[in-house]
Amino acid sequence: MGTVDDYLSGLEPADRAVIAHVYEIARAAASETEQGTSYGMPALMHRGKALISVMRTKKHIAVYPFSGRVPEVVADALQGFDHDKGTIRFQPEHPLPDDAIRAIVAARIAEIDDPSLRRG
């Protein structure tokens, strides 16, 4: 799979709009991002590390913060959304709030900048 832009170009318009919005908020919340891939998924990268990936699955849209800790750290912002270690799920008609996306990105950036957080 290619970059975020490549991935978005292959989506149905309704899914593309929802997923692109998550990426737009993530880009705005992070000072440095570039497109790349991680674990075979298109992703935004921060300082060479995977920051976030957002993909359409059969049953939902999934946000992957490349961390099992991040969903736990931002659990208050995810009230009403299905999440577990490493994945946050939502339906296009009930998208993640922008503040939740910002919280996910901030928590993941904190981990990238201070790897000791991943162990805590």
Image (cartoon, helix red, strand yellow):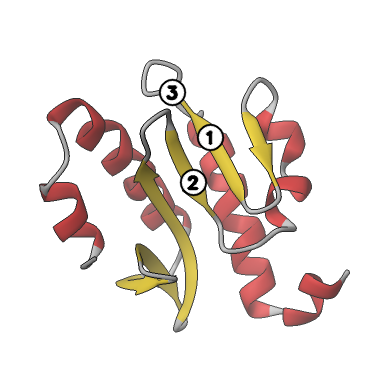
Please state which amino acid type lies under the numbered disc 2: Val
Residue that numbered label 2 is attached to? 63
Residue at 59%, 47% in the rendered image: 87
36 to the left or right of 70: left
- Cα distance, mark 1 to mark 2? 6 Å
- Residue 91 is marked as 3
Q: Are the residues at dot 3 and dot 1 in contact (C-beta closer than 8 Å)?
A: no
Quick check: 44 above or below 112? above
Please state which amino acid type lies under the numbered disc 3: Gln
Percent of width and height locating residue 106:
61, 57
Percent of width and height locating residue 88:
58, 40
Please state which amino acid type lies under the numbered disc 1: Arg
Element type at mark 3: loop
- Residue 28 is marked as none
- Mark 1 vs 2, N-terminal side: 2
Question: Farthest residue toward the top?
Answer: 93
Q: Residues within 10 Å of mark 1 (few under 14, many from 20)?
A: many
Quick check: 64 above or below 47? above
- Cα distance, mark 3 to mark 1? 7 Å
Question: Farthest residue toward the right?
Answer: 120
Residue at 34%, 72% in the rendered image: 37
Percent of width and height locating residue 19:
31, 39
74 to the left or right of 19: right
Residue that numbered label 1 is attached to? 89
Residue at 36%, 46% in the rendered image: 55
Element type at mark 1: strand
Q: Residues within 10 Å of mark 3 (few under 14, many from 20)?
A: some
Q: Are the residues at dot 1 and dot 2 in contact (C-beta closer than 8 Å)?
A: yes
